[in-house]
Image (spheres, rainbow, N blue to C red):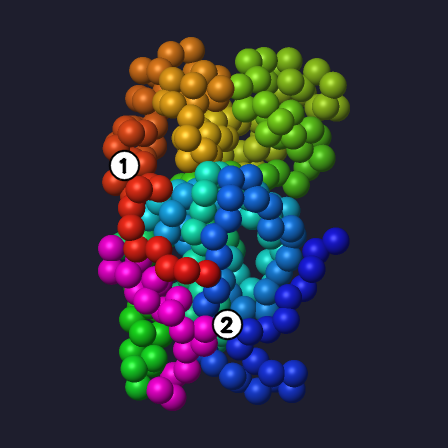
Amino acid sequence: MSHKCQSLLTGRKGAVLAEMASLSYDFQDRHLIPEHSHPEHQLVFASVGVMTVHTRRGIWVVPPLRAVWIPARTPHWNVMSGAVSMRTLYFLPALVHRLPRKCLVLNVSALLRELILHACKFPKLIRKRRDQRAIIEIIVDQLEAAHAVPLQLPHPADPRAMKVVQRLLDDPAEPRTLERLCADCGASKRTIERIFRLETKMTFGRWRQQLRLLHALRRLASGEKVTTAALDTGYASTSAFISMFRKQLGTTPTRYFGNGGARSGGTTSA
């Protein structure tokens, strides 16, 4: 059962206590935060490590220099890959207007990263205080200007397609074709392909490639070598995996994690 968290920004009678709040935590590899929801919009950022945010509609991976935007009242749970320093900002729903009411992964610029880390020094930020108002306004401006990146894996709602999804989530390296995966899911290959296009806005092949990319990100964040992550993800060779990774994220796995991964600084104590 999903736990509904109490508001960090409003009192019991609805009085606004602050416009923004922050929480900082450090977690070990594979730590699970059970399903819960917040009455505020939430920005989840890993200053160190990689997190996976799960909802009933899909998966969003938070690697270095990325953050997940989670709209208010969205049930979700988080899983850590490697040691993670999580920095979370909470916003009054009326404060942010231009971001969609759905989860998405955002690029975090160097400026926004420093602003998030600075804001996490304050348990609550209040617009009536001039110094805190400036922090709030710049962060909101930066968020609304940030670009979304395709590091999500939407789930279809159709239970027949979800049987295929669950098998691949259990083993992303599963080698069977879609036709063979459909053998006992109660629908034909053509029907499942149509469901994926309609409900995830992705072809099944593109969805499967995305699953493998996100799985590889988590394995790499946990300290596995590139070759091991490639084979565990279902690629026949390391070069094919690196080529896919570069095409999707613009650089190689080694450079990607070296430029913003677990060795980068700027953490604060929880």
Q: Residues within 10 Å of mark 2 (few under 14, many from 20)?
A: some
Would you place residue 206 above or below residue 30 in this image? above
Residue at mark 1: 258
Residue at 54% from the left image edge and 24% from the top image edge: 172
Q: What is the distance, in whole Å, between disc 1 and disc 2 at their CAs? A: 35 Å
- 89 or 150: nearer the eye? 89
Q: Secondary structure at mark 2?
A: helix
Q: Position of residue 153 (x, y in %)?
A: 51, 38
Q: Which mark is residue 102?
A: none
Q: Secondary structure at mark 1?
A: helix
Q: Amino acid at mark 1?
A: Gly
Examine the structure image and report whether residue 126 is included in the region drawn in magenta: yes
Span of residues in magenta: 110-129
Residue at 61% from the left image edge and 33% from the top image edge: 195
Residue at mark 2: 93
Q: Position of residue 213 (x, y in %)?
A: 43, 30
Report if residue 154 is visible in the image. no
- 46 or 92: nearer the eye? 46
Q: Is residue 21 left or right of residue 264?
A: right
Residue at 29% from the left image edge and 50% from the top image edge: 265
Q: Position of residue 180 (x, y in %)?
A: 64, 13
Residue furthest toward the front?
269
Q: Residues within 10 Å of mark 1 (few under 14, many from 20)?
A: few
Q: Position of residue 50 (x, y in %)?
A: 43, 42
Q: Is residue 188 left or right of residue 249?
A: right
Would you place residue 209 above or below residue 85 in this image? above
Q: Amino acid at mark 2?
A: Pro
Would you place residue 156 above or below residue 165 in this image? below
Residue at 62% from the left image edge and 27% from the top image edge: 170
Q: Earlier in the sequence, mark 1 or mark 2?
A: 2
